[in-house]
Every structure is written in structure tokens, then in C-alpha cells.
Amino acid sequence: MKTFLRKVKLSFLAMLCGWLACNIAWWVGAIPRMDLASVQHANLKQSLLFALAVAICTAIVIGMAWLAIFLPVDLCVNDASRLRRPRTAAGCGFLAAFAIVLAAFVAFAWNDVSRWGLVDGIRATWSLAAPPYVLGTCATGTVAAYVRARWDSPHAQHHHDKP
């Protein structure tokens, strides 16, 4: 039971780090796409509310991803697995996040196939707002998986050192 609760706690904290990375990456992708003239004239209160809304929305989505994907994987992967190596975990986290976001954008584009065709639908979907979401999602998966594996690195070495 102690191991289960420890894994839940560590995976939650790793996903929290992923959430922070997601928000930073989201803004890195969103700021270049913003109309700077409208940003300069924006009400500070409205801008802060928008930033809070982004943080809340990403927290909800990442919370669901933690419960549906990250936590179950963390609980199922053996502590001695190669997947627990930080670089390998980060790569897997990136690939999983990218696959999810790619599937979502293809699904959205698929809805507009009759209007544009699949390839043009993907281009249109990408041009609307994809970069912030792709960056945020990939940052979440990469950072959360890396941090989670990194926190276990010293523990895994101690387990191997025991006779």
C-alpha cells in the first residue's frame, strides 16, 4: 500500500510539473500569434482572467490525462523497467502526447472533410490555433515523464545495490 500511495503522489507531483511546463509552452506558442495592438489596449483585469481561464482549462485536461493515462502507466510499469530511465521516459512521454494531439487534430479536420478534404482540413485546423496546444501537450508529456523517472532514479539504484 505504501508503494501504491508513493507512486500516486510522485506521479501527481510529476504531472503538476508537466502542468507548469504546459502553461509556459502554451504561452510561448500563443504570444507570437496574438495581435499586439489589441493586447496593448486590453483591460488588465480581462487579460488576467483569460490567463486564469487558460490555467484552469489546462489543469482540467491534464488532471483527466493523469487519471486516464499517466497514473495507470506509472502503476503498471515495473520499477526496474528501462522505461523508468529519464531520457527514455521523456521520449515516451513526448511521443504519447504528440500522438494524442495529432489524433485530436486529425479528428477535428475529419469533421470538415466534406468542406475542405482531409489534408486541407488538417492545414486549416493547424493554422487556427494548433501551435500552443501542440507545444503545451508535448511539454506536459515530456516533462512529467522525465521528472517522474528522475525522482525514481536514486531509488532504483538503491534497489539494484541490495544483495
Image (spheres, rainbow, N blue to C red):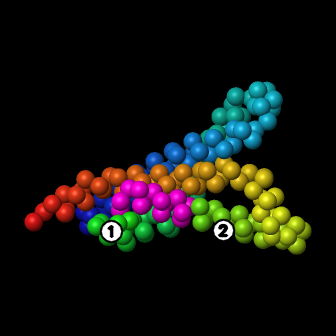
The verdict on residue 49 being magenta is no
The residue tagged 1 is 81
Q: Is residue 12 visible?
A: no
- Please name the residue shown 77% across and 31% down the image: 36
Residue 60, located in which quarter of the rendered image?
Answer: bottom right
The residue tagged 2 is 103
- Please name the residue shown 69% across and 31% down the image: 45
The verdict on residue 95 being magenta is yes
The part of the chain drawn in magenta is 84-97
Seen from the viewer's position, the closer of residues 22 and 142 is: 142
Q: Amino acid at mark 1?
A: Ser
Q: Position of residue 42 (x, y in %)?
A: 76, 30
Mark 2–mark 1 distance (CA, rounded to whole Å): 28 Å
- Please name the residue shown 59% across and 45% down the image: 25
For discs 2 and 1, the disc positioned in front in the rendered view: 1
Position above or below: 141 against 32: below
19 vs 161, left or right, is right
